[in-house]
Image: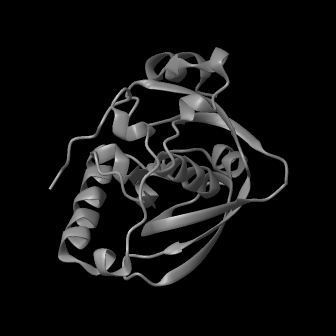
């Protein structure tokens, strides 16, 4: 089921989400929500979707950077962003650790701020400790674009939006970005 995506201004996007218990994670309600979130993310299309974006103030996000999303991106741009396809997965109750390396600045958008993008400075490498959809503990070491996606989605779980971190003078419509900044 495709769910409506909450837009900026809705208070749920500014709340710190609550953690899920193991029993909640294993419940049919959360398992069905994960499937709906995956379908909603793909339909948007997006590379991540956090539960607050569909009105649920819980520590749950889905992530996937599909191969078809990167197939028309130049090899130079993929290398510059350290971007590659990422298989679908779920993060629950994540704890993020940023590595003190050179950060990376790139334009970023959000399904909850439709039609706009801005440059955001993010850590280029992170470690995330969380639970998966089976309530099993996992550790994710990520760099480049994947690290950016994780930071963006975990920000949502903590009541933050990319506009809180953006370089304000770069805020632009997606249309203007594609026309003026695409390279």
Locate residue 150: give its quadrant.
bottom right
The answer to which of 174 and 159 lies nearer the viewer is 159
The residue that appears at 74% across and 43% down in the rendered structure is 104
Q: How is the image coloured?
A: one colour
Can you name the residue that lies furthest to the right here?
Answer: 101
Q: Is residue 80 above or below residue 86?
A: above
For residue 79, side relative to residue 145 (left or right)? right
For residue 57, side relative to residue 182 (left or right)? left
Residue 71 at least partly seen = no
The residue that appears at 73% across and 49% down in the rendered structure is 123
Residue 84 at least partly seen = yes
The answer to which of 80 and 50 lies nearer the viewer is 50
Q: Where is residue 156 in the image (x, y as percent from the top left)?
A: 47, 46
The answer to which of 183 and 36 lies nearer the viewer is 36
Count of picture labels: 0
For residue 145, side relative to residue 70 (left or right)? right
The residue that appears at 20% across and 48% down in the rendered structure is 3
Q: Is residue 94 above or below residue 155?
A: below
Q: Position of residue 173 (x, y in %)?
A: 47, 18
For residue 72, side relative to residue 112 (left or right)? right
The answer to which of 95 and 45 lies nearer the viewer is 95
Quarter of the image with the N terminus is bottom left
Can you name the residue that lies furthest to the left here?
Answer: 1
The residue that appears at 39% across and 47% down in the rendered structure is 46
Q: Position of residue 42 (x, y in %)?
A: 31, 52
Q: Position of residue 81 (x, y in %)?
A: 67, 47
Quarter of the image with the C terminus is top right
């Amino acid at each position: 089921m495709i769910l409506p995506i909450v837009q900026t201004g809705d208070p749920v996007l500014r709340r710190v989400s609550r953690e899920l218990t193991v029993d909640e994670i294993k419940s049919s309600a959360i398992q069905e929500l994960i499937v709906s979130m995956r379908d909603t993310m793909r339909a948007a299309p997006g590379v991540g979707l956090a539960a607050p974006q569909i009105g649920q103030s819980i520590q749950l996000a889905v992530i996937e950077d599909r191969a078809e999303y990167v197939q028309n991106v130049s090899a130079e741009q993929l290398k510059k962003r350290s971007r590659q396809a990422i298989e679908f997965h779920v993060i629950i109750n994540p704890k993020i650790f940023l590595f003190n390396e050179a950060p990376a600045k790139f334009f970023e958008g959000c399904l909850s701020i439709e039609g706009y993008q801005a440059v955001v400075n993010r850590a280029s490498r992170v470690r995330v400790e969380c639970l998966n959809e089976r309530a099993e503990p996992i550790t994710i070491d990520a760099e480049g674009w994947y690290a950016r996606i994780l930071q963006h989605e975990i920000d949502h779980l903590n009541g933050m939006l990319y506009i809180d971190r953006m370089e304000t003078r770069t805020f632009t419509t997606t249309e203007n970005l594609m026309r003026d900044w695409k390279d």
